[in-house]
Amino acid sequence: RCVNAPRTFVNEEQCTLSFSPTACGSSGTPDVEIELNANNIALLHSITGQYIYGVLGLPVVDHEDTTLESPCTVGLRSRWEIKDATECTHSILGTETNATLVDLLTKSSDTNPFVRDIIFPTRGYSCSVDDTLALDDVELVIGGICYKRVHPDHMSVYDFTYWTLDDTHPGNMVAAMEGEYNPIKKWMDLDNNVFLTYPSFPSGDVPNHSAGRWDTHSTKFPMLGRFGDTVLFVDLPNEIRLDEVAQHFGETSSIGGSGVVVCGSPFEAPNDPSEGYQFDMTTRRNIDLWGLGSQREHLWVMVGLTSVDQLRQRVAWALSQLLVVVPGAVSIADSHTEAFLTYYDIFVRNAFGNYGDVLREISYSPLMAENLSFLQSKSAAYMWETQGKISFADENFAREIMQLFSTGLYLLNLDGTQKLDDYGQPIPVYSNDEIMSFSRVWTGFDYQQARGNVEETSWSGNRHDPMRIQSAWRDKFPKTDLTGGYIGDGYPLCIDLPDKMFLRKGARYRLLGSSSSPELMEDHSYFKKDPNIKRFVLDSNSGLKARLCNASNGECQYEMSVTLDTNIDCVGKECIADTVRVVDVGGIYYEYARPPCVEQAFYNNAMKVIYRERWADSSCANPLLPYASEACCSVANLRAQRYPNYLYDQERVLFSTANSRCEEIGMTSCDFNDIGGIETHQKGYHWSTDHCQILLKVNS
């Protein structure tokens, strides 16, 4: 593994550009899709050692006569196995029930070839009264297909490794005492079977298992998806999301070669065992080494007693008693040392600094995120769109960062006394409404990709570096603040930024090195491999190029981050670009970071943008912002094409620019079906001519 730390707000100023042929760095989360089929599940087990199975045998009605809720229950997700029509008999249902279920199943956008999930709508559909309580073992034949009602977790794929441990599944210890093979491991190890059959009903000497038992224990099994689904690498459980997995499926999170941005941990020093600064480290081979859980305390005592900066050490100790991570809430507490010392170093570094900086660092700490359960918290929209689940962002940290770490429970006067209302009662700082709003702020936080030269076992996740944000998991809607406004108040509206902001004072550029892959935006993984990708190459006489090159004695002196301190006149292509993403400065690349601004959730004259092709995805976009590329059609032809002189792949332009480009080549913008003339990975969002409405749902 590459040993360099990822670039974050903590170490960015100390990063350097290395031209060593052995240099390596991180290219972010691998852009890999994995189909959950039998071959790939077996491969994931082989690579990771985790016991991954699709689950069969879950009952619709168990041996205790416990039944599933009716699929006609409003808001309920029901699952239906797809079978050949000859294998089923159409169930006798009421006319209204039959019509409703057939309509929902046939109109579902679910593309899984083995099961279909439907969610009963809140309005517009209903079932016959006589059917609502008796829809257990239902089979519906529609054309040549049978849809059979099954358990909502039937054929879901889980990591069952937790249940293979000696002290988790009762049958494991019984099997060991009787000299039999582990009952969870045997499916993969002995039978080469990627499915585990849940024993709902008696089978030999195995007792029957109730549906309630599954509901109780299944929460401990990370779910990968459904058998037949195609899942993103980023959505895999931590124990499976390894570089080795990404590499096998054709991608990696590492980059190497000449011109690589390399970073280290803050105040990291070379290891010199002769100085006595060493400790035992956990590995896959020594996880039972005695005393690892106490090692960090021994190291802390040694440092505290012998350091010359006693005041710093005492302030750090005081801060650690306020911003507490409970070891029992962190799964590696009994085996790891370095991750806890890294967390404590936050207080040592910032002992004489700003408390706001301390709060920022502990908020990005993976230990704090695990301790207060917002690690990998996902937005309600993401969970609904990807898993069909109704869920809410985790509220734990949103509450505790106020109650324990900052504001406290009640408003205070300048002298520290509590502010009182007209009835003499203390005035709370926040209510549950603020907690729910702030919980959406803490969505999307995830481990950095694993790296080398740190104490880390492959299954534990990167608990050393500040977390990264997975943009797809983030809640994208406005969040209220504590004063009746919104968190974005005080920032300009994005539509009010000046034209060609990328050349204006305040524009910021981040060094990427020889990699042209952006870090703040996402490109298809093929961009790294396609030599024909069109880049935005700055002209030789460009003022922007001169500033980014920062030449001395004819050699560019690339800075890690460049903020323009004055406006720059445009040259060549810069004059017709609405914005830029990544710019080429003679083989070294910089990524443009737009200044912080607010994009309003509701605005007038919204236009529809389509992702690649009509049947893939579409959304509303503000025509006054550069959100998408042009799509130009000739008369009566909805297979669009791009403007032949577009500036770079994945370029985003204003709606008016898109129209002008199409008119220039004798075509018009259109509500297109597909984009021709370019490869699939070169397509992004493209403007259509269709207006769209942004609607707000209010639950009364």
Image (spheres, rainbow, N blue to C red):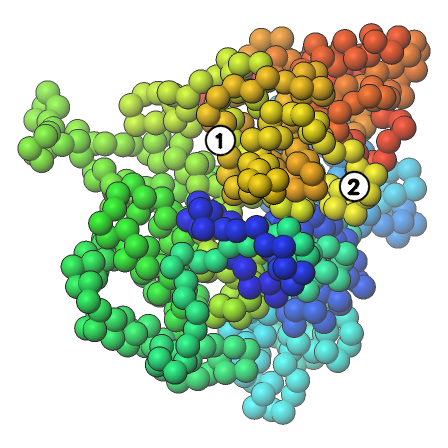
Q: In this view, does 494 lie above or below 534?
A: above
Q: Which amino acid does label 2 sit on?
A: Thr
Q: In this view, does 368 lie above or below 506?
A: below
Q: In this view, does 478 lie above or below 191?
A: above
Does any portion of residue 527 appear in the rendered image?
A: yes
Image coords of residue 279 (percent x, y): 39, 78
Instruction: Pick the residue in front: 671 or 319.
Output: 319
Residue in the picture at 16% in, 59% down? 311
Front disc: 1 or 2: 1
Q: What residue type is labelled 1?
A: Thr
Q: Label 1's element?
A: strand
Classify mark 1: residues with Cα within 10 Å, few (<14), some (14-19) or many (20+). Answer: some
Residue in the picture at 67% in, 46% down? 515
Q: Which of marks 1 and 2 is nearer the N terminus?
A: 2
Q: For mark 1, what is the residue? A: 563
Instruction: Pick the residue in front: 647 or 421.
Output: 647
Image coords of residue 535 (percent x, y): 74, 34
Residue 689 in which image quadrant: top right
Q: For mark 2, what is the residue? A: 111
Does any portion of residue 78 appear in the rendered image?
A: no
Q: Label 2's element?
A: loop
The N terminus, quarter of image? bottom right
Residue in the picture at 65% in, 72% down? 49
Q: In this view, does 78 lie above or below 333?
A: above
Left or right of 602 on screen, residue 652: right
Left or right of 644 on screen, residue 648: left
Image coords of residue 555 (percent x, y): 61, 42
Image coords of residue 76 (percent x, y): 60, 39
Pointer 1 and pointer 2: residues touching (CB < 8 Å)?
Answer: no
Gap between marks 1 and 2, in whole Å?
A: 46 Å
Left or right of 304 on screen, residue 228: right
